[in-house]
Image (spheres, rainbow, N blue to C red):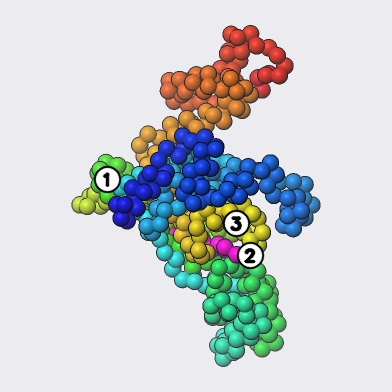
Amino acid sequence: MSKQLNEEVQKLFSGFSKLNKKERYQKLVEMGALDSSDVEYLQKKEPVSFDLAEKFIENVIGYFHMPMGVVTNFIIDEKPYVIPMAVEETSIIAAASKTAKWVKENGYIKTEVIGQEIIGQIQIPKVKNYEFLSAKLAENKQNLIDQANVEVAAGLVRRGGGVTDIKLRPIERPDGGMMAVIHVMANTCEAMGANIINQVTEFLKPIIQQMTGEELGMCILSNLVDTKVTRATVVLKNINTELGKSIEEGSLFSQIDPYRAATNNKGVLNGIDPILIATGNDWRAVEAGIHAYASRTGQYTSITKWTYNEDTSELTGVFEAPIVVGTVGGVTKLHPTAQLSLKMMGIESSNELSQVCAAVGLVQNLGAIKALTTVGIIEGHMKLHIQNLTLGAGAEEREIPIVQKKLEEILKLKKRISLSHAIEVLKELRSSHKVTTQHNEVR
Ligand code: MEV
């Protein structure tokens, strides 16, 4: 990345977390991430209508409001990003922004998507004649692909995608018989592709059934999209040996122990899920795909890997897993906040969105491992958590700074803090001030 771009981004993001709400909006408008109508929208009491919710789901009773913030300091593939995150966990945005600053000042992030096809499955529960089935499918493969592309996926074909391949996999049944699965491969362009691939498989089912004489079962996409994998790489230079080695060791732990891998991957998803939510993407699908990919060798492992090179003093991290997202269709298209989020990031393709998610997940992971292998998790987490505890205890506006200060002192002294500390501090404060109105009762 050029020195000039780095300095420009540095200037744009500097001091962002210290700004008040109005200044934050101003800064984002200055950056070109928002315009005045976006700011107006974000400040509305009820930005999204009840009617829209009725279009998404049944039995609507309202909305669940989740905080949305922006992550700063990210430069991915030499492009600076303002990244929206819809998330409730206190330290996620702060940790991602802080770690991204470290990366920006000492290295770079590059990303890529490997492969472009998603998978639709058609099950054949009890295969009668595998050889005949296999031969028939091979003989008619192109014909089946063409029919699906004309009858169901014509729109995709017009946009440069469509059904590309049909494969057969045998699976041994527990009763000794044979199951088989037909994998229908498709490039779904800017769509996540669930609807279209499900339609394609259901369209092909009766045709294949008639052609092969087999009894076909369920038709559904697979979330284990190992045919379209997103990779992010972070390289940090001039890392001292002690820190580099401890991060490598922390990462090794998650590569060889599934108990640690689960927590490591949860931390990676801390960086990914909030972007998926902000952009109206199906985070359950991505979660399922990532966890299945993490188990592909038979043992659940880490989806990130950090290595340190003592000779060059370089720390390198790699994230690799499927993150199949869409930038058109569904909630992404209909929800105004999802549209705003995509615009804020300047996202031009579904692959680009997937690459941003991978980069943020990897940097979030770096922040967590760095904290865990140095000062520990309590310090960063708890300082921010104090705010929540203070509010949770029922502190009022004028009491908040006093309670927070006292809790920080307790944290320093005891290295831990809980809601009961906050309640105790607030009780003491009130009794010393003899404030006993019903209104500010300690919860
Ligand atoms: C907490 O939300 C996430 C971490 O547990 C991740 C990790 O342990 O790597 C801190």
Q: Earlier in the sequence, mark 2 or mark 1?
A: 1
**Eye-nearest disc, 3 or 1:** 3
Residue 255 on image: x %, y %: 40, 53
Residue 434 magenta-drawn? no
Label 1 secondary element: loop
**Left or right: residue 353 compared with residue 222:** left
C-alpha gap between disc 2 and disc 1:
44 Å
Residue 321 magenta-drawn? yes
The C terminus, quarter of image: top right
Label 2 secondary element: loop
Amino acid carrying label 3: it is Gln
Residue 83 on image: x %, y %: 49, 50
Q: Which residue in the protein does label 3 denote? A: 339
The magenta stretch spans which residues?
320-329
Residue 137 occupies quadrant: bottom right
Amino acid carrying label 2: it is Gly
**Left or right: residue 39 compared with residue 253:** right
Q: Which residue in the protein does label 2 denote? A: 329
**Which label sits on residue 239?**
1
Q: Earlier in the sequence, mark 3 or mark 2?
A: 2
Amino acid carrying label 1: it is Ile
**Eye-nearest disc, 2 or 1:** 2
